[in-house]
Structures are given as structure tokens and as C-alpha cells.
Image: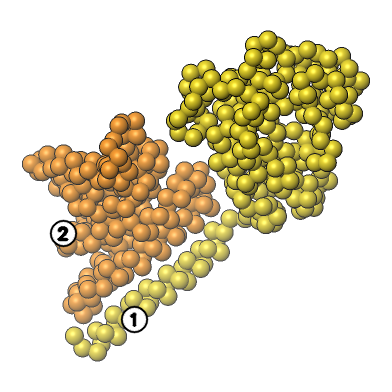
Chain colours: A orange, B yellow
Amino acid sequence: MQELLLIAVGAAFVNNVVLSQFLGICPFLGVSKNVKTAAGMGGAVVFVITIASFVTGLIYKFILGNPKILGGELQYLNTIVFILVIAALVQFVEMFLKKVMPPLYNALGVYLPLITTNCAVLGVALTNVQNGYYEKGVGIGLLTGVVNGFATAAGFFVAIVLMAGIREKIEHNNVPEAFKGTPIVLVTAGLMAIAFCGFSGLI
Amino acid sequence: MNITAILLAAAIVGGAGLFIGIFLGVSGKKFAVEVDEREEAILDVLPGNNCGGCGYAGCSGLAAAIAQGKADVGGCPVGGASVAGKIGEIMGVDASASERKTAFVKCGGTCEKTKSEYEYYGIKDCIMASQMQDGGAKGCAYGCLGYGSCVDACPFDAIHIVDGIAVVDKEACKACGKCVDACPKHLIELIPYKQKTFVQCNSNEKGKALMDVCQVGCIGCRLCERNCEAGAITVNNFLAHIDADKCTNCGVCAEKCPRKIITVRFEA
């Protein structure tokens, strides 16, 4: 239990997916113009990453990383199979939500299909494998993977909402001409990354 | 690595692809949401400019609203009667032919007819200019500033600055209302396309003050109001207003107007 908690805090803050691993930068910069859309994107990412880490965990555990199949040699297929599965999963989730939960579908809107191209999703699936979470038993391994996925996505949510809040303030500031637009956003992102370094002594 | 490993890898990736393909195909059928056929048919008929003149986010928004019965079949101001008719056929209702409208700029104060108070060297933008002293450099605080915010707003290239005031090209105008929102002086209004008699003034200034700055402004003398047989003209706040429903375009008001600010254009 304590270990899970440590993994969660570590994934959300210490190794924040955006600000210290530099994954998922495209939506972080692209959809952070105002807090509302940023929260929408963050919510959709949390939703998809949590499901994706479970499904990719199943696939790794029973097919690609299974020692009974060629002694686990098929791990080099991780990336390509995970991409395939995540893209299909996003499609399926979209169809499913449209039919079963139209309000949620409308709330997530255009951000849901955009997640297909979010490298953070693939990043979490691969990190789960690299950190050896699945080496433990089936149940605890999958649970660890899902917790790690959820916490990573929560970290993404925090980062993108913070960024959007700051950008909304920047709108009203007198930014020098040369820094207007993307440059000032990148500078801000860099400063946020330094600030998040403060968490590194936490664990 | 031997040949079995290669075949197995190909089988796994291929199998995953095949499985996902079938799975998505089946769930696509299973979770298909019934889209109203009429909605797509209506979307095909609509102009597709996504101008937002109807008040919805775009043509698809209006199509959905019409299909659900939330919007009128003539909801598209751009498409006019022809589109309304086609949508009416799709929806199976009689299209109450919505009247074609056009934008009209209520100012006739060209460069030579209206005085300027000072030289404005700022950004060529009406909203900017209207923030300056006395609501812009123009002598008349109600008149067209002529910096073309409406021109920028128009998606159909139907409004242009001619001789210091905005002029609407009646044929090109689709009455989407973008210019109406863009004008900081609220000078532009939508009038029926058939309307031929106009009051080209928006000033609530009293007679003397207005005559000092503009040669063509309405001074509120009420001559038109008294002479109008149809009772279509009312003068409020020193400004004549024509009720398009009552106006017969007889032209009496234009003859009587001492300032020649009411104009009748039969050719247009």
C-alpha cells in the first residue's frame, strides 16, 4: 500500500510527465490557452491513460512479456503493439461514450480523438514495463501499472491547468514584442520545470 | 532469433491488427448512434460558410437545431428563401419564405459633408478610434468613422469604405449581421431587401448643433412625419425612423426633407 502511494506521488509530482520527463508537450503547449479547455484536455488524458495502462498491461503480461512465448523475447514489439492498441482504444472509447454517456462525450469533445497523438500515453505504457511493475504477480502488477498511469495523468492535468492559468494572466501583461506568443510560453514552461525540481527531494 | 521468432512476431502484430480491425468494426455497428438523416441532408443544403450569422456555432450546429425542431427552417440568413425552401422540403413543412434582408449603414456624412474635429493618426480601427476624445475625430459623435472595422468583419466582401463612410453592396450582402456587431457606433442595421426609402442618419443631436458639423444630418424637423400618408415615419430624439412594414416607398418624405437625408433608390 505504502509502495503504491509512493509510486503515485512520484509519478504525479517528482517525475511529472510534462515538466521533468518532457512527454506530452504538444497538448501542453497547444491546448493551454484557457483553463476550461485545459481542464477538458487533462480530464480526457486521465481517462484514457488509466484505461490504456490497464489494457497494455494485460497485453504485456500475457503475450509480449510472457516467458512461455519465446522466453519473453517479443518485448521489442512493445512500442508498435502498444501504439496500435492505444489508437484503437481511443477510437473505441469514443464510440462507447457517444452511445452510452453522451454528456461525458460532449464534455470531452474534440480532445478525446486528439489523445491518440499524445506521447504521454505511450510513455506511461512503456514506463510501466521499464520500471518492472509487471514482474510482480498478475494482480498487483496490473494494479501498480494502473496507479502509475492514473497518477502520471493527474500530474499532466495539474501541469496543463497551471500552465493555462499562467497563460491567461500573461495575456494581460506587457510582454516584449520578441517574446510574444510561443517564446514566452516556453520560458514559462522552463520556469515551471525548475519549480517542479523542488519535488525531487520528496522521495 | 530464428525463423519461428520472425513468423511469431509477424503473427502477433498482424493478429493484433486483424483483431482490432474486427473489434472496431463490430463495435462501430453495435454502438452506432442514430444520426438524424435529415440533419445531414440539411447540412448539404446549407451554404457551408460557417459564418455564424444564424447564432449557432456553424452550419452543422444550425442543421442539428433545425432537425430537432429547435430552429426555424428559414434560420439561415445567408441562404435566404431558396435554402429555406429546400430545408422545408426535407423537414416536410411549408417554408414560410423568410424575407431577404440586407445591411444598411445609417450615415451619409462623407468626408466633404461632415467636419473633422482633429486629425487621428492612430490604428485604422473603428473601435480604437471611437475610444478617442469625443468618440472619434469625426465632428458628429454618431457618424461613421470610416476606418473599416465592418469591412474586416464582413465574410462576403459586401461592405466597403467609400469617401469616408461604409457602404453596403446590397447584392453581395447576406445579412449575416457580422458588421452590425462590429460597428462601435451601432450604425448598421438589417433592413428588408425590398425597402427603398432610407434615413441616412443616426444622430440624436439637436438641429443647431448638428448643422454645425454635418451638412446632411437629420435635425428632427418632423416634416417627413407629418407628410407621410402611411404613418410609417416617427421622429424620436431628433431622428427620423422609417417603419419598414408600413412604408409604401412613395417618396413623399424624400421630397419634403429639407436636408435631403431621406433618399429613395428605385434602381437598387
Q: Position of residue B110 (x, y in %)?
A: 65, 30
Give, as a three-letter code, the residue at label 1: Ala
Q: Residue at x 60, y 22 (%)?
A: B115
B181 lies left or right of A198: right
- Which residue position holds label 2? A131
Give, as a three-letter code, the residue at label 2: Asn
Secondary element at tag 2: loop
Quadrant placement of the N terminus of chain B: bottom left
Q: Is residue A154 in view?
A: no
Closer to the camera in the image, A199 or B163: B163
Closer to the camera in the image, B99 or A115: B99
Quick one: which residue is furthest to the right in this view?
B229
The disc at residue B11 is 1
Secondary element at tag 1: helix
A47 lies left or right of A14: right
Q: Residue at x 61, y 38 (%)?
A: B161
Quick one: which residue is furthest to the bottom in this view?
B3
